[in-house]
């Protein structure tokens, strides 16, 4: 009798929780550490650490994890469509996106569907590397999604009904949205992919209520804007089609009121002859004021890039001791194979250290300008890492507990980059790239078998000490990985790879504590949430979303 | 006569760069300059997804010479121009009809044209196919391993279509220096378990934790890497005929294999 009453009260409390579900205020987004059970932002927090404070699952009990449920997305995953979204968890509901743009609200307890909403992208949509979506954002009672045809949409989180839909760029010219939007205050902030199609990139803020554009920062500066001088072709045409795409979500420091976005490659990708100069702000991190879009500082990782090393990897923020001084740092493991630490207040260059075999750079000057020693050539140049890079969209993690930075890596790959002597012609809507580099390890292939030689490239989750850039441990896999990483306060790291294994590792040592075969490539970031006092781990593998927890006592 | 002395003056017949591909490709032959132009266009427009060998997109192996959505050259041209809605194959209206014809020439000959890297274009000696056949099934011992449209072992490639898939130079290389360029899918592997038992076989698959072989008894066998003291790729069992067969005999075998077009 007594316990039955308890149950009634408990379920009333649950109902109450569900009722408040669709009220994600700016305050809640600013204070995510106060509710570690929820996962309210693409990275979990504004700082991009992908670190969960939940501690029910520990190194001691992680071996007992049990599958709770699986949800299969509508369209099968494959080379064209990977399941790259990180779900949001909001008070009992998991929101995620199946490729390309199918939104679903799932009952986190059972995996049953509350509602689905499918968007059919314009057939003009063109994306270089997959019809994918990395996830949603939520504000108030509204979800936001970018689509591969450059549409940005607001959906009612309770019903899945469309509230508004705007276009941020012409899909037939290559403008596409694959990024999970960033919400700051009452602004929704995104930038377009399309660096292989001669877009002119930007980051823009839109009003959460109306979709009206509030400000725009051009990632390729035009005449009169600072940085324009780094596009030095005499005809002054290159900047108009200079690339500078955006495809992973920025991070945000509310105290400094600065957000940090990594900017993609200049176009054409593999032949820079038509665009002499450094080509700002491609291959850079830009620190922007979210109220105005004004640039506070920038740092360029790869100058005048001809290797397509997009610097869009997550710019992870942490307050750590660096060289004995407390510092507000920004850390990133770049596709170009180098791990960087900067001071995020002013962009001061603190450290650069390769985390895989790298041969395009042999040092940095005091300001952090790389001394680049390789470039594509007519006869072909052997360059490490390969064109897909040492890492890519896969989210890294930083654990304030271990002080280590965890990065999914492709070890010791190479490409041969050949430059056509004829230059590259721009045709609207067509690839504006140059000659594709060769790769022993292909970018998109999701083959069911692996018969490659180890020297053609293998994958690893690596733990980097930000103080030195040294690799502290490395969990190797026989194939490469497109998986993100989650770390937890109980000293666990979760990540997987193309083979379909999903691992729990000891965050301090890299020791494997648990693994499961999901039967499809892991191409997204795992996340954790808590419901009814129980901690869950969610990860997508192949076309499915898999959710694990400890058994009930 | 020793094989190393095999040189251009001895050529009985110069191989031309004109091959007809497998299957439907036989409706046309393509000129070397078409194929060359197609190679450049392929590298500029297609390589990023379809890869050096054309086989990187699952379900769309361009090098197979067969296409799910097109059979004639004109259909292929239309397919590449209009793309495949809802996939990464976007329309390519900028490519002229001539460009598209070149790309098709390149695709149709991809099994023999060496893909993006191109073939070793050196001329090789091509002898008498009848004598080559005799050698293949007789003294040279090739048929102990390779079937031709059946026979032979599951461990080794059936060579029934090899003439439509490899250039003469590649066929000669395969006999003289078999370890130089072992094609993916034909690699051999060896595992040693913790008791010291050694197993060899054709590597079908492997991952971080396991190995799947077709073992030398032609049985499917798997291993957990945790139970192994060693696992590694090994040289393949294909013996080199260098120092074993004469240049004339090698040329005869090349001629025989060129004649194997799978019909």
Image (cartoon, coloured by chain):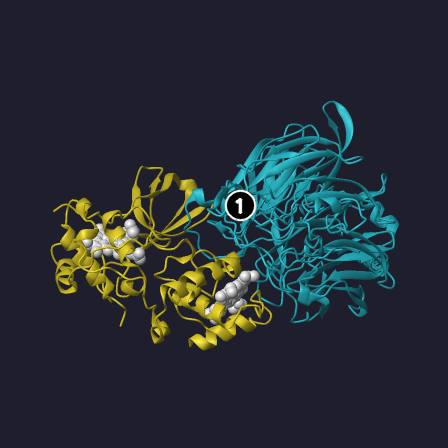
At mark 1, the secondary structure is loop
The colour chain B appears in is yellow
Q: Is residue B199 visible?
A: yes
A146 or B113, nearer to the observer: B113
Vertical order, A345 against A122 (above or below)? above
Residue A180 percent location from the top left of the image: 72, 55
Residue at the spot 77% in from the left edge and 36% down from the top edge: A344
Q: Is residue A536 visible?
A: no
**Image quadrant for the N terminus of chain A?**
bottom right
Residue at the spot 14% in from the left edge and 50% down from the top edge: B245
Query: Which residue is disc 1 drawn over?
Result: A376
Instruction: Report whether A39 appears left or right of A306.
Output: right
Quadrant of the image occupied by residue A10: bottom right
A424 or A381, nearer to the observer: A424
A537 or B47, nearer to the observer: B47
Instruction: Report whether A346 appears left or right of B233.
Output: right
Instruction: Report whether A438 appears left or right of B9.
Output: right
Residue B198 percent location from the top left of the image: 30, 41
Residue at the spot 60% in from the left edge and 53% down from the top edge: A523
* Colour cyan maps to chain: A
Label 1, residues with CA under 10 Å away: few <14, some 14-19, many ≥20:
many
Residue B176 percent location from the top left of the image: 23, 48
Residue that extends furthest to the top in the rendered view of this protein: A324
Chain identifier of the residue bearing label 1 in the image:
A
């Amino acid at each position: 009798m007594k316990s039955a009453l308890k149950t009634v009260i408990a379920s009333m409390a649950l109902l109450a929780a569900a009722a408040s579900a669709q009220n994600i205020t700016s305050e809640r987004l600013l204070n995510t550490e106060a509710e570690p059970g929820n996962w309210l932002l693409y990275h979990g927090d504004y700082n991009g650490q992908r670190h969960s404070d939940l501690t029910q699952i520990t190194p001691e009990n992680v071996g007992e994890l049990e599958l709770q449920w699986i949800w299969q997305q509508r369209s099968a995953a494959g080379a064209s469509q990977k399941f790259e979204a990180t779900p949001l968890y909001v008070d009992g509901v998991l929101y995620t996106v199946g490729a390309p743009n199918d939104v679903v609200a799932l009952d986190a307890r059972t995996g049953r569907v509350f509602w689905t909403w499918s968007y059919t992208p314009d057939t003009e949509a063109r994306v270089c590397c997959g019809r994918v979506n990395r996830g949603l954002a939520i504000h108030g009672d509204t979800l936001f999604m970018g689509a591969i045809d450059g549409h940005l949409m607001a959906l009612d989180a309770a019903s899945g009904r469309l509230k508004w839909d705007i276009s941020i760029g012409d899909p037939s010219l290559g403008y596409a949205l694959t990024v999970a939007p960033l919400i700051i205050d009452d602004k929704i902030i995104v930038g377009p992919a399309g660096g292989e199609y001669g877009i002119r990139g930007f980051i823009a803020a839109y009003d959460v209520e109306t979709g009206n554009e509030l400000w725009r920062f051009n990632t390729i500066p035009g005449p009169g804007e600072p940085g324009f001088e780094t596009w030095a072709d005499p005809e002054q045409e290159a900047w108009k089609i200079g690339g500078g795409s955006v495809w992973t979500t920025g991070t945000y420091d509310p105290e400094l009121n600065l957000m940090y976005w990594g900017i993609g490659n200049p176009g054409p990708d593999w032949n820079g002859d038509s665009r002499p100069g450094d080509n700002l702000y491609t291959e850079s991190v830009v620190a922007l004021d979210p109220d105005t879009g004004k640039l506070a500082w920038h740092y360029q990782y790869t100058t005048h890039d001809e290797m397509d090393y997009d610097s869009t990897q997550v710019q992870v923020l942490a307050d750590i001791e660096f060289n004995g001084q407390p510092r507000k740092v920004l850390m990133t493991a770049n596709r170009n194979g180098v791990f960087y630490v900067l001071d995020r207040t002013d962009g001061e260059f603190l450290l650069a250290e390769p985390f895989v075999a790298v041969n395009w750079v042999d040092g940095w000057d005091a300001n952090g300008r790389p001394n680049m020693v390789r470039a594509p050539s007519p006869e072909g140049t052997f360059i490490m890492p390969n064109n897909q890079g040492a890492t890519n969209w896969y989210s890294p993690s930083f654990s304030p507990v271990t002080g280590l930075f965890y990065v999914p890596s492709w070890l010791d790959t190479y490409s041969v980059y050949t430059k056509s002597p004829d230059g590259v012609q721009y045709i609207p809507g067509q690839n504006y790239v140059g000659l594709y580099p060769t790769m022993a390890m292909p970018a998109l292939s999701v083959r069911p078998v692996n018969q490659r030689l180890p020297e053609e490239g293998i994958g690893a989750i690596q733990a980097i000490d930000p103080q030195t850039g040294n690799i502290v441990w490395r969990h190797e896999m026989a194939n490469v990985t497109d998986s993100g990483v989650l770390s937890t306060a109980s000293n666990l790291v979760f990540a997987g790879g193309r083979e379909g294994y999903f691992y729990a590792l000891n965050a301090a040592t890299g020791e494997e504590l648990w693994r499961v075969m999901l039967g499809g490539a892991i191409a997204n970031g795992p996340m954790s949430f808590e419901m009814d006092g129980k901690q869950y781990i969610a990860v997508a593998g192949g076309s499915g979303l898999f959710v694990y927890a400890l058994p009930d006592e | 006569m020793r094989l190393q002395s095999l040189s251009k003056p001895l050529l009985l017949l110069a191989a031309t760069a004109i091959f007809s591909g497998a299957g439907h490709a036989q409706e046309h032959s393509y000129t070397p300059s078409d194929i060359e132009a197609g190679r450049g266009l392929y590298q500029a427009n297609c390589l990023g997804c379809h890869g050096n060998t054309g086989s990187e997109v699952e379900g769309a192996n361009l090098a197979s010479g067969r296409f799910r959505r097109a059979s004639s050259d004109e259909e292929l041209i239309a397919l590449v121009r209009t793309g495949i809605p809802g996939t990464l194959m976007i329309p390519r209206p900028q490519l002229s009809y001539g460009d598209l014809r070149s790309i098709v020439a390149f695709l149709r000959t991809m099994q023999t044209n060496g893909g993006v890297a191109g073939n070793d274009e050196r001329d090789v000696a091509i002898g008498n196919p009848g004598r080559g056949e005799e050698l293949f099934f007789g003294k040279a011992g090739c048929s102990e391993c390779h079937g031709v449209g059946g026979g032979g072992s599951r461990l080794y490639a059936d060579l029934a279509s090899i003439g439509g898939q490899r250039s003469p130079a590649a066929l000669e290389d395969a006999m003289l220096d078999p370890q130089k360029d072992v094609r993916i899918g034909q690699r051999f592997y060896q595992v040693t378990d913790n008791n010291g038992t050694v197993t060899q076989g054709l590597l079908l698959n492997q991952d971080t934790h396991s190995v799947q072989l077709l073992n030398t008894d032609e049985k499917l066998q798997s291993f957990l890497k945790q139970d192994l003291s060693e696992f590694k790729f090994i040289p393949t069992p294909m013996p080199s005929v260098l120092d074993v067969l004469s240049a004339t005999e090698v040329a005869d075998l090349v001629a025989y294999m060129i004649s194997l077009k799978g019909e």
